[in-house]
Amino acid sequence: MSIGHTLLGLLETGPRHGYDLKRAFDEKFGHDKPLHYGQVYSTMSRLLKNGLVEVDGIEAGEGPERKRYAITDAGITDVAQWLATPEKPEPYLQSTLYTKVVLALLTRRDAHDVMDVQRAEHLRLMRSLTERKRKGDFADQLICDHALFHLEADLRWLELATARLGKLAKEVNG
């Protein structure tokens, strides 16, 4: 995820302080990985330097001054270009799970054990996501569906690979 573009997109809805940007980011996108304040401020500093945001106001308070950031026209153009650019599909050709299966075979360990442990972990995570989806709002349901579909694809691969372990073992161990 591009944190800079996400913060720019949030600013497109109106000027905000760094604290407000962090809170909005965490609420909409950071359920599993909230932003650190330092990450927000270092990103805003870079966006400011690149002319994508400007300081819209400074408020004095009991602590340090609070800068309110606003998106510039260049920032709006940048977000529009980012949104229009498709994400590169991830083919997973360098899968850690595949590597573990092959190494288990190479070292004469039981690759079925590797597959079983992974299958159990996938199912545990799927149950957790299903519960989160059941309790969540529509946005949470949608992101959980995305994760669940990927996990289902992994499970299908686990079943296929398990059925083909004998043939893979022959190729790996030549």
Image: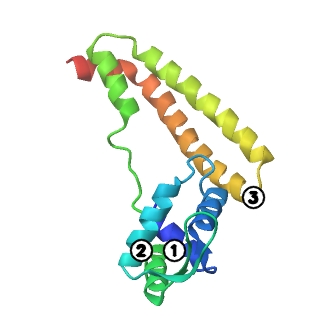
Query: Percent position (x, y) of residue 142?
Result: 67, 56
Residue hosting label 1: 8
Could you say which quadrant of the image residue 47 lies in? bottom left
Q: Residue 86, can we see it?
A: no
The coloring applied to the image is: rainbow
Which badge, 2 or 1, is on the more N-terminal residue? 1
Q: Is residue 172 above or below residue 151?
A: above
Q: Quadrant of the C terminus?
A: top left
Query: Residue lying furthest right in this view?
Result: 135
Residue hosting label 2: 47
Query: Percent position (x, y) of residue 66?
Result: 57, 71
Question: Foreground mark, 1 or 3?
Answer: 1
Secondary element under disc 1, as helix, strand or loop, is: helix
- Mark 2 vs 1: CB contact within 8 A: yes
Residue hosting label 3: 138
Q: Nearer the viewer, residue 136 or 32?
A: 32
Q: Residue at x 39, y 61 (%)?
A: 88
Count residues near mark 1 (Cα–Cα under 10 Å), then give few for <14, some for 14-19, many for 20+.
Answer: many
- The amino acid type found where label 1 is placed reads Leu
Q: Is residue 131 above or below residue 66?
A: above
- The amino acid type found where label 2 is placed reads Leu
Q: Residue at x 58, y 23 (%)?
A: 120
Q: Is residue 134 above or below residue 107?
A: below
Q: Residue at x 39, y 82 (%)?
A: 51
Identify the mark at residue 141; answer none if there is no mark.
Answer: none
Q: Residue at x 55, y 65 (%)?
A: 64
Question: Foreground mark, 2 or 3?
Answer: 2
Secondary element under disc 3, as helix, strand or loop, is: helix
| Number of on-image labels | 3
Q: Nearer the viewer, residue 13 or 151?
A: 13
Q: Nearer the viewer, residue 87 or 7?
A: 7
